Image (cartoon, helix red, strand yellow):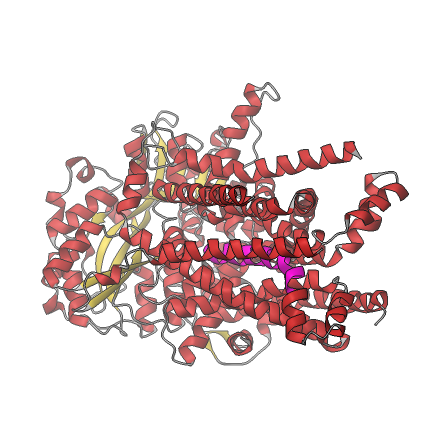
Amino acid sequence: MVNNHQMHTSRNRKWLAAFLCVASLSACQPSPEDGLKKGRTLYYFTWSDYVSPDLIAEFEKQAGAKVVVDTFGSNEELLAKLQGGASGYDVAAPSDFMVSIMARQGLLAELELEQIPNATLLAERLQRLPFDPDNRYSIPYLWGTVGIGYDSNVIFPPPESWTVLWDPRYKGRISMLNDQREVFGVALRVIGQSLNARDPAVIGQAKSKLLSQKPLVKTYTSESYDQLLISGDVVLAHGWGGAVARAMAERPSIKYVVPKEGGTIWADCLVVLKTSRNRDLAMRFINYLLDPAVAARTTNRLRFASSNRQAKALVDEQLRENPAVYPLDSTFDRLEWMADLGDAIRLYDRAWTELKMQ
Amino acid sequence: MGIFFFIPLLMVLAVSFASRGTDGGVEWTVNLTNYAHLADPLYLRIYGRSSGLALATTALCLLLGFPLAYSIARAPIRWQGIWLLLVMIPFWTNFLVRTYAWIFILRTEGLMNTVLINLGLTTQPIELLYSDWSILIGLVYGYLPFMVLPLYAALERLDSSVVEAAWDLYATGWFVFWRVVLPLTKPGVVAGCIFVFIPSLGAFITPDLLGGAKTMMVGNLIQHEYLVMRDWPLGSAISFALMALVLLAAMAYFKTDGRLDRLERGG
Amino acid sequence: MNRGRIWLRSASLANLLFLYLPIAVLILFSFNASRLSATWQGGTFRWYLVLVEDQALLAAVHNSLVVAVVSTFLATVLGVSAAVGMERLPAGRRWTVEGALLLPLVIPELMLGVALLLFFVMIKVPLSLVTVTIGHTVWNVPIVAIIVQARLQKLDSRWVEAALDLGATPWQAFRRVTLPLLTPAIIGAVLMAFTLSLDDFIVTFFTAGPGSTTLPLKVYSMIKSGVSPEINALSAMLVLISMALIGLSLLVQRQRN
């Protein structure tokens, strides 16, 4: 027993030593704070991958300040954290509908547009947007549409209507977004209604349509449909244009269409948070991101269209011509912005839960 | 530590009695409508389905984890720590990356099907992904070590002479296990079950990624209410109800078990 | 008996294979030239090179490790004392404490994260890695306590009584008798707490301050744009380094003997 005990203790000490080694090793790593001790720091809270390190480095040199980027995966997480009271962020990149919510909640600072001259270069279609017509709080940054990505080798002739997603020939090879508003939006358009319908009867009809579709759907995903298109697991994917554009690069037979019944137009916007302590630095950063050359680089990398009309000329030609990135002019009259529905959202929520539980 | 936990808890409890504000802020009109919502048959189905899945996960983890924990406990002392580390190291990698790896394995043209078809064990690919089965696999995989560790802690002190005596007494391994090993290691088994069952109930990434988001589990529901619907009050109410149920069950168990234990030890 | 042993061994081996299968897959994909895991496009070391250059990601890993070590340490100290303290309680009060101890585990993480955020804001503590560590400790303590207690419960009290009879103080009895007997449970608990802390996302997301990113935060937000194989490379490195450390400690042990 004594021997056991001794071996136990020495073994215990060994693990302790190992732990301490790992801990001290990790402590030896250079801390990023050592770089720019003096000067101010800008905190940018945004989507993963939205800003590349070289852009950051450029701005840091220009402005003589440090930029720290934190990321979130969804608008809702962003809101929840800010609503909970988190502060310290200067610039954020919420989507269109989230901007109006955040503004109403008093989370946003008013923009001084004189400090953001590049804001005057907004593409025409993106001026006077319903959720913030005067750009009081936000400036559109990246934008696009929601449509169908499809494999043109399998689906011909090219689909024109959302009803192709109900085609039993493609059973088990269809994916839909995992987003209650977008999925219901598809069904609503198919029955000739608006994406922003509030009538319970209409929503009920949409729900029935979706229930009838569910057996054909392989998965509801907002993230992996580009992978599924590339691997061929799915031949019809409901998704955002940018992701489909990424898939196109890997598999040229993939194409994108916004069906004739209409689609959603979305825009991620740059905002300054009310709790920011560096407002002018924040606005300078926004101005930098909206610079035509900088914006073009971002579009080339991310495959999301930039809001800056001068940037378009600087973007790679194949992206410029790609309807998944820059929507065709002909589609514009069919596009709708997602509006806040107030209490009617409860109806959608219930219907969505019922859809999932079937 | 108590303060850090109980005060936030009370705050969230308070929120659960309020209603959702227009934009999902909290409107402080106290009422019980949220709790009334809980009894909704749709939600009851969700709880039932999730509990079933969580129970299956726990059972499988116990089944798979026990032999592993037992072997480690029986191994030479020098090696035990190493085996434990080997069990845990896969879980120091990132959860998402592991889940994507499973997607690759379970896909229609994924690793599993390729191997099965090449070995001639089946002609048609087995569609495991985006179903309840893949959720089960994902959950079992994710929580297996959390069953193994407490089991190991309890099994380690199991006196081998007792087990040998049991083998002499009962001819079959099953009896040895059921009558001798299990009762002696009960606290470890209970701890393991708790560590697997509870997180399985609240899981939401696994059902979404591996299950194709085609079903809603309690975890998805809570996440949906908190984040998408921005209805903190309802989300809190559901969380509390869930908590209360599990807690009551656990405490009822502890109470009876503690009493029996007291008798066994004679004081 | 032999048949039982063979069955036991093969079951354990099958388990280990099961545990490492996805790891093998992820290591494989860390060499994939394509950014998306849908297709294999030839082997490359590119992602490892990107990883080494990626200061932000390495800083996040550093943060994750520090938080994990500290919160595990705190949780172990608090958890062991809680477990030992609980054993001394009369049965009636004990199960109340056990129930209270279970509380942080039973709560869905989302709720815990939000609650902690609201709390920190209320007491005007700025969010940072410290608040993250506190959050992790909150659910790690019950884990340690429960595992340790599982073992403590069945511990023969005669050892401690004997020590006390021989003139040891309660603290000495604890340190020299109880603690060594608890060692396997403590090791198990430490491993579990450390692992959980390393990979935690939700509570961390809500309690992290600007700039205090951990690895899971960075990775989870990549979910929309596709998780870069860089993360596969990172995970593969973690596995390899851990294995190497184990190998090293084995060598050291062998030399000792």
Q: Is residue B155 left or right of residue C198?
A: right
What is the span of residues highlighted in magenta in the rendered image? C179-200
Q: Is residue A181 above or below residue C52?
A: below
Front residue of this view, candidates A103 and A107: A107
Residue A287 visible in image: yes
Quarter of the C terminus of chain C within the rendering:
top right
Front residue of this view, candidates B140 and A336: B140
Q: Is residue C150 left or right of residue A237?
A: right
Residue C191 in magenta stretch: yes
Q: Is residue C117 left or right of residue A69?
A: right
Q: What is the quadrant of residue B247 in the picture?
A: bottom right
Count the labels in the image: 0
Q: Position of residue A11 (x, y in %)?
A: 57, 53
Seen as rendered, the residue at the extreme right is: B169
Q: Position of residue B138 (x, y in %)?
A: 56, 44
Q: Is residue A79 above or below residue A220?
A: below
- At x 63%, y 56%, the residue is A6
Name the magenta segment's main secondary structure.
helix
Q: What is the quadrant of residue C159 in the picture?
A: bottom right
Quarter of the N terminus of chain C within the rendering:
top right
Q: Position of residue B195 (x, y in %)?
A: 62, 57
Residue A275 in magenta stretch: no
Residue B235 visible in image: no
Q: Position of residue A151 (x, y in %)?
A: 36, 30
Front residue of this view, candidates A194 and B38: B38
